[in-house]
Amino acid sequence: MIGRRGNPWLATYAVAAVVLLYAPIAILFLFSFNETHFMAFPLKGLTLEWYRRMSQNAGLFAALSNSLQVAAVASVAATMLGLLAAKAMTRYRFPGRAASIGLIMAPLVIPEIVLGTSLLAYLLAAGFKLSLATVTLGHILLCTPFSFAVLSSRLAGFDPSLEEASLDLGENRPATFLRVTMPLILPGIIASLLLCFLISFDEFLMAFFLAGTDQTLPVFMYSQLRFPKKLPEVLALGTCVILASIVLIVLAELLRRRGGAPAQQ
Amino acid sequence: MRNAVTGPAFILIDHVTKRFGPIVAVDEASFSIGRGEFFSLLGPSGCGKTTLLRVLAGFETPTAGEIWIDGQPMATVPPYRRPTNMVFQSYAVFPHLSVRQNVAYGLRVERLPRAQSERRVEEALALVQLSGLADRRPNQLSGGQRQRVALARALIKRPKVLLLDEPLAALDKKLREEMQVELRQLQRSVGITFVFVTHDQEEALALSDRVAVMFDGRVAQIGSPREIYDRPASRTVGAFIGSMNFFPAAYRGRENGALVVDCAGLGKIAVPEGNRRGEGEPAAVAIRPERLRLTDRPPTGQAAVPVRLISSAFLGDRSHHLVGLEGAPQPIMVAAQSGEAPPAEDRPLWLVADPSAALLFSDD
Ligand SMILES: Nc1ncnc2c1ncn2[C@@H]1O[C@H](COP(=O)(O)OP(=O)(O)O)[C@@H](O)[C@H]1O
Ligand SMILES: [Mg+2]
């Protein structure tokens, strides 16, 4: 790149794309500190009032707690399913393997609105009561393909003779899992947990369709938008969520990199 | 070459068969290995060497038959309790551990006092000359160094038997030859029984006290390197070990303790009775390239046949000449010391064959 003269239009285009993509986030950030609830320039003055109000909003904390619960359960469940599937698909060759992978990955390509409505119809027909549990089910469905993808790439390079070498050196199977398998796939597991957590945490459609009376945070934020005076509070909340997400994503990426390749044969 | 202590079998492989579905990977293998022996399993890729080694290590359960090591039946002993350790073909060095941690890995279960286990690690590192690299990570090591880690990690356990699966196959030629010498010296100094798998016949001959030659899951011959080379049990073994010229032949009868055959290209020759391999009627004459000689003067008093030179390859320490022989189906390979003058291309040439160096094979 450096020292090479590219097409100047390309550079302009790239800058414009970045600005367009991130300007809304910058605006969200700016207006969360604005003194009035009208979103218009110029800013009237800086205040932390909205953050203060946000921190006293009981409904918000109920929704936040709901979201954290759903995300925690969904990310653990999806990571366990993804791990089992990834272990099977990378270690064994069997008829129907490609079809199985397709099925696991399907929620990535099926429009979420279709998944959401069909899941809703199915759960109601099956006699389930809508609750945070049904939201969690939907999120597990959405998260499993991501977990599977992260963990398969981790396990693909895993040399099975590493586990055999441990057995050969006198460690039994549980000890081998703890001393060899686990450390080698741990970065993948953590990355999968973080990724699934984030996906579940900001997911709207499923949570909107499948929740009963309990709202998750995104659904709560959406409902607040009906009241114009609440807007700056939602902006403040949005800013907090974005900052937390950035921290988690950076953490996940650092872990993924630090883990390196599982084996360098 | 040192003779291994034989006597009562140290490792007994008793009618061991291993099937994977329809594939018979090891077919009725039955032999024993002596204490302190450097024993090689030699054969082409896919003949079942790795499978037999994995049966010894306990990673595969034999479909039939039994393994005994030092008087103990191994049938119900899991890999982590066997008196064997393995150097894997991929080395399987733990990538998340340092060299020192890799070498110390197997000591945890031995629950030694700290000072003693540290001393064992230092000894093992010194044994394979890795003391200076103890704190490196495996991805900072060369292939040869990783192989030493795998070796030290196995030897520190002081196994009764060390199993090695093509440990030198991934190294380049120069390093491979150095490691061959080191391995042989190492085996003598530690006195552990080595079972060494290779598809490289030169390597097997150079290193082993005894070699088992395997084809298609079956053990075709077991013997010292010299026996295997000089007196191959069958035509297949003869062709696999070193180079061998084969001539179709028809049996004509016995004469003064020798067997007379009509040999394509060489005519009627009398081969000593002792050079006959196998039970059936001789159907082929086999002679190693170094037992043949080319000359440009018609020799007197020796059986010689005219040949024409097809090509020559200079290999440094020796040369290989391919010659065409009337009546023989394939070109004949003749090996010559590099000191010998090369045959002239435009002069008539004669091939001199010593019948006492010929082997007789029946069809197998
Ligand atoms: N786990 C397995 N499943 C099915 N077939 C196998 C397995 N391991 C080995 N084989 C087959 O058994 C035969 C012998 O293999 P192997 O012992 O690896 O040979 P070598 O080490 O001599 O190259 C081969 O035909 C191989 O394909
Ligand atoms: Mg093999």
Image: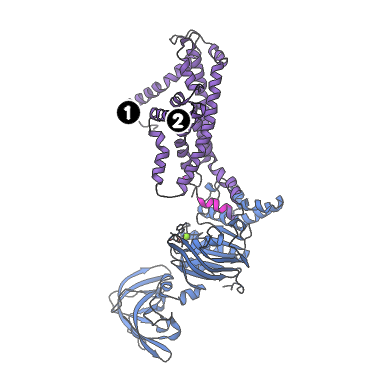
> Which callout, 2 or 1, points to the residue nearer the camera?
2
Q: Is residue B251 above or below residue A202?
A: below
Chain of the residue under the numbered disc 1 shown in the image = A
The image quarter in which residue B303 lies: bottom left
Q: How is the image coloured?
A: by chain
Magenta residues (range): A156-166
| Chain A drawn colour | purple
Residue where numbered disc 1 is placed: A7
Query: Residue A137 or B259: which is nearer the viewer?
Result: A137
Residue where numbered disc 2 is placed: A123
Residue B175: image x %, image y %?
50, 59
Residue A31: image x %, image y %?
47, 13
Q: Is residue A211 above or below residue B58?
A: above
Query: Residue A160 or B113: which is nearer the viewer?
Result: A160
Q: Is residue B231 above or below residue B93?
A: below
Chain of the residue under the numbered disc 2 shown in the image = A
Report the quarter where the C terminus of chain B lies: bottom left
Say what amino acid the circle numbered 2 marks.
Leu
The structure residue drawn at horizontal position 39% and vertical position 40%, both measured from the top left corner, is A102
The residues bearing labels 2 and 1 have C-alpha atoms spaced at a distance of 54 Å
Please, what secondary structure does the residue beneath circle 1 have? loop
Ligand 1 within 8 Å, label 1 CB: no
Chain letter, colour blue = B
Query: Residue B26 or B250: which is nearer the viewer?
Result: B26
How many marks overall?
A: 2
Can residue B294 be seen here? Answer: yes
